Amino acid sequence: SVFERIHNKSNDTEKKNEVENMRLVKFIGAEHQHQPQGIHFTFIDYLELVDWTGRLIREGKRGAISSQSPTLLTSLGLNNDT
């Protein structure tokens, strides 16, 4: 899901068309949008959550994103204002 959402933001038309054909739940982002269903996160908040959980180190987890690696938002050229 993260892969599909990130590639949906890319400029690659072929990848974007492939992703648009997939059914992903939309982000609501704000209650005032009055959308009946969706994920109650902005896309940016979702990416930050994915990055944060990817960096967690705990027993039984296969791996983790290095603390030295740039954040997902930085890697994608995004920021909280995007």
Image (cartoon, grey):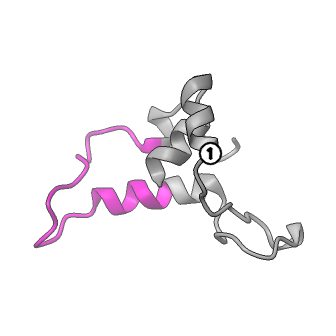
Q: Main secondary structure of the magenta part?
A: loop
Q: Which residues are magenta?
A: 48-72
Left or right: 25, with 46 as reference point: right
Q: Residue at x 64, y 66 (%)?
A: 41
| Residue 45 location (% of width, % of height) | 58, 59
Q: Is residue 9 above or below residue 62?
A: above
| Residue 16 location (% of width, % of height) | 60, 33
Left or right: 69, with 73 as reference point: left
Tag 1's secondary structure? loop
Q: Is residue 35 above or below residue 80?
A: below
Left or right: 18, with 69 as reference point: right
Q: Residue at x 73, y 65 (%)?
A: 28
Q: Amino acid at mark 1?
A: Asn
Residue to which mark 1 is pinned:
21
Left or right: 57, with 43 as reference point: left
Q: Is residue 7 above or below residue 52?
A: above
